[in-house]
Amino acid sequence: MSTYIILKKNFSSLNIDIKRLKYIVISHEHQDHAGGLWYVLSENPAVKRVPGLISG
């Protein structure tokens, strides 16, 4: 199962609206920690990344 699908299911099961996120914290830039970031950014380009390791 792709990171995108897992992340989407997890947000949905927690009733989190990605478009309402203000910040997302990434511990480090490995795929298992940041792999779904591009999905979040595509749904909410205004979300601030902490730390700003990945430009968008």
Image (cartoon, grey):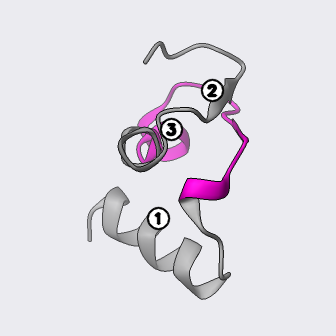
Pointers 3 and 1 in contact (C-beta within 8 Å): no
Q: Which residue is mark 1?
A: 7
- Amino acid under disc 1: Leu
Left or right? Give the position of 46 relative to 24. Answer: left
Mark closest to the chain's N terminus, 3 or 2: 2
Q: What residue range appears in magenta?
A: 19-37
Q: Nearer the viewer, residue 11 or 20?
A: 20
- Amino acid under disc 3: Ala
Mark closest to the chain's N terminus, 2 or 1: 1
Q: Quadrant of the C terminus?
A: top left
Pointers 3 and 2 in contact (C-beta within 8 Å): yes
Left or right? Give the position of 13 relative to 42. Answer: right
Left or right? Give the position of 30 relative to 49. Answer: left
- SS type, badge 3: helix
- SS type, badge 1: helix
Q: Position of residue 9 (x, y in %)?
A: 45, 79
Q: Is residue 37 above or below residue 43?
A: above
Q: Quadrant of the N terminus?
A: bottom left
**Mark 3 → mark 1, Cα distance in angstroms:** 11 Å
Q: Which residue is mark 2?
A: 28
